[in-house]
């Protein structure tokens, strides 16, 4: 495998999934793998298509060195299931939505994001939209752990194919 691609999915693609997108992009860049790993994000709905990530998500991410400003919300399309190697749902509701839409032969690509986080007892990344600053910080904590695991997995996939 010479290339690996990851899609993060939440409801509107303005809080959780673009945060994961920005964090993993930065980790991929730091690992020197930008030419081999593609990262994107999308929403299960079209509520915010074309909009930048939530201002609060951007502010909290920026404090940790992640720039989300160039990202724009989009809705998941059917081609995403064949285009990406992993389609990661931010919570169980997104997972159910994605599994309903995904062709049966591609179901193994659709998984819960936090399944990749080491030492994490949670399965869902909570939606910070209606809460305060603590919610956005909690999302970042979970996302950093999950993205670290996703990066390790992607590197393993890339390395396994080059042996």
Image: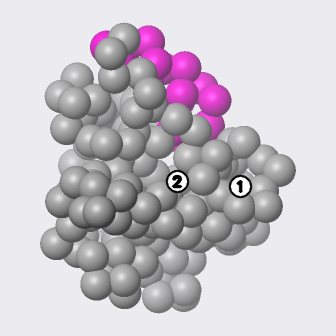
Q: Is residue 49 covered in magenta?
A: no
Q: The N terminus is located in which quarter?
A: bottom left
| Residue 112 % position (x, y) | 58, 39
Q: Earlier in the sequence, mark 1 or mark 2?
A: 2
- Answer with left or right where residue 52 lies relative to residue 134: left
| Residue 2 % position (x, y) | 18, 60
Residue drawn at (60%, 26%), measured in percent from left and top? 93
Can I make out residue 126 in this image?
Answer: yes
Above or below for 75 versus 13: above
- In the image, which disc is placed on residue 131? 1
Residue drawn at (44%, 27%), measured in percent from left and top? 108
Number of on-image labels: 2
Residues 103 and 13: in front is: 103
Check disc 1: other Cα within 10 Å, few if <14, some if 14-19, many if 20+: few
Residue drawn at (42%, 47%), measured in percent from left and top? 8
| Residue 118 % position (x, y) | 71, 61
Residue extending farthest front: 163
- In the image, which disc is placed on residue 25? none
Above or below for 104 versus 148: above
Q: CA distance from mark 1 to mark 2?
A: 13 Å
Q: The C terminus is located in which quarter?
A: bottom left
Our reading of the magenta stretch's main secondary structure is: helix
Residue drawn at (52%, 53%), measured in percent from left and top? 16
Check disc 2: other Cα within 10 Å, few if <14, some if 14-19, many if 20+: many
For the magenta stretch, what is the residue range?
Answer: 89-103
Question: In the figure, residue 102 lies in which quadrant?
Answer: top left
Q: Tell me the element at label 1.
A: loop
Question: In the figure, residue 30 lies in which quadrant?
Answer: bottom left
- In the image, which disc is placed on residue 16? 2
Q: Tell me the element at label 2.
A: helix
| Residue 28 % position (x, y) | 35, 75
Above or below for 40 versus 159: above
């Amino acid at each position: 495998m010479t290339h690996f691609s990851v899609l993060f999915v939440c409801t509107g693609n303005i809080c959780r999934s673009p945060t994961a997108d920005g964090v993993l992009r930065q980790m991929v860049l730091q690992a020197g793998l930008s030419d081999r790993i593609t990262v994107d994000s999308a929403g299960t709905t079209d509520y915010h298509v074309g909009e930048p990530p939530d201002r609060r998500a951007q502010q909290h991410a920026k404090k940790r060195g992640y720039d989300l400003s160039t990202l724009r919300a989009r809705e998941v399309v059917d081609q995403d299931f064949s285009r990406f190697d992993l389609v990661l749902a931010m919570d169980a509701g997104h997972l159910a939505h994605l599994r309903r839409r995904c062709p049966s032969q591609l179901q193994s690509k659709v998984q819960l994001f936090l399944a990749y986080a080491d030492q994490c007892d949670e399965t869902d990344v909570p939606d910070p939209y209606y809460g305060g600053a603590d919610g956005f910080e909690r999302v970042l904590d979970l996302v950093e752990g999950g993205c670290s695991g996703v990066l390790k997995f992607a590197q393993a996939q890339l390395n396994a194919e080059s042996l």
